[in-house]
Image: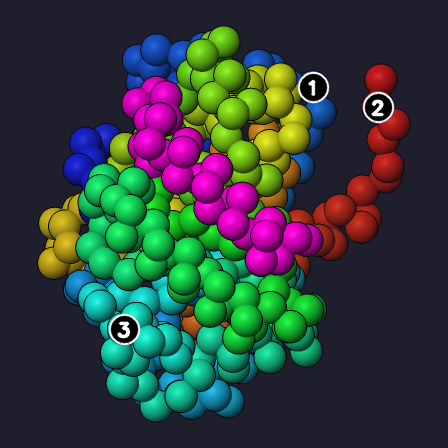
Amino acid sequence: MILIKPRVSILPRSAFLRRFGAGIAAVSLGLTHAAPRHRTKPLKVKPIRGSWISIWWDDRRHFYWNEACLKNTATQWALAVQEVAEIGMEYLVLLAIAKDSKAFYDTPLLPKLKMACDDPIGALLTAADRHGVKFFLSSDWFGPWDHLCLRDPARVRARFQMMGEIARQYAHHHSFHGWYWPNEAALGPYFTDDFIACVNACTCEARRLTPKARTLIAPYGTHRAVCDDCFVRQLERLDVDIIAYQDEVGCLRMNPAQSAVAFETLRRAHKRVPQRALWADVETFAWEGPPNKQISPLIPAAFPRVREQLEAVSPFVDTILIYQYQGLMNKPGSQAFAGHPDSARLYSDYVVWRRAISQSALSSPKQSDP
């Protein structure tokens, strides 16, 4: 998940949306897209099915959990996986396999980051094997993120070498479910040719190394989403299994009502290219300091906002991931606690809500489709 993009702040709609509904609020906020169509059935809100997770990040956005993660033992990494499984998550996406020219595993390409756990990737995957969690492993962060990383021959060679090393060291784990291509692109409203070429080359290499692995990307720029022939042709060209678009609520590019409009637009496009699964990457963070600055630590968003985000995307996506559980949600009293103190409250609020919607689903009479 790359959080380096400039954002435009949008004021929250608070009680207005709750009173009048997402569709009316979207129109009143002056959106250029049509509001989501009226539905006669009650909204079925999807729970969180997975999250990004990081070993280390090199700026203050991960301030509240960076040091704790560096000190994690193998037992604590295992507990972190167990705790997401306990609340119904089945996917974890490793944000990076290296950062700031330091690797998180043994490679001749880079020096290894100094950590308490000698092999955190192995510890995560071993625990995921045990708890039925499926991992998408990152392919990158050999060097700084810039547009050259997509096509520079030396960077491409290094990326493929790292992918080969990761496959040799970790693909024997049955939790190795797929790959995440972390060099994210923006919808503008279309993908660039360089991005499509990079994704397709990575997927081709992944198929050679791990033929059964799934592939995942998480683009931003979702507020610009369109459904037209040009975008549909790009989806057809883009060789990836899953596209988990960022909902951009945490980064203040959209509010939940606008997110619903954008994801409905994307659903119309993906219906024309059903081989590309449509997932959501819901941003569960707020900012302690100035928004969208690398000097500002991420802090947990209030659960009412997160609930609205889940409600907004649920009708349109197959699966909801979040950015992210780690650091922003923590089981109270956990021995693997890493993050802001308020993360325990977000965890508890989510668990209470998830239990309530699960009980409601069990007690509601089944309705047949018309």
The answer to whether residue 145 is above or below residue 312 is: below
Q: CA gap, disc 3 to disc 2?
A: 56 Å
Q: Of the numbered discs in the image, which one, if any, rests on residue 369?
A: 2
Q: Which residues are magenta?
A: 185-213
Structural crowding at the residue carrying mark 1, measured as other residues with C-alpha within 10 Å and reported as few (<14), some (14–19) or many (≥20): few
Q: Is residue 365 visible?
A: yes
**205 horizontally vs 356: left or right:** left
Location of the C terminus (image quadrant): top right
Q: CA gap, disc 1 to disc 3?
A: 56 Å
Q: Which residue is mark 1?
A: 40
Q: Which residue is mark 3?
A: 110
Between 152 and 58, which is closer to the camera in this rendering?
Answer: 152
**276 horizontally vs 156: left or right:** right
Q: Amino acid at mark 1?
A: Thr
Q: Judging from the image, what secondary structure is the residue with disc 2 in?
A: loop
The spot of residue 33 in percent (x, y) is 40, 12
- Disc 1 or disc 3, which is closer to the eye? 3
Q: What residue is shown at x 44% (from left), y 80% (from top)?
A: 120
Indicate which disc, 1 or 3, sits on the residue closer to the N terminus.
Answer: 1
- Asked if the residue under mark 2 is in contact with the one under mark 1, i.e. CB atoms within 8 Å, the reply is no
Q: Judging from the image, what secondary structure is the residue with disc 3 in?
A: loop
Q: What residue is shown at x 52% (from left), y 25% (from top)?
A: 237
Q: Amino acid at mark 2?
A: Asp
The answer to whether residue 309 is above or below residue 179 is: above
Between 173 and 342, which is closer to the camera in this rendering?
Answer: 173
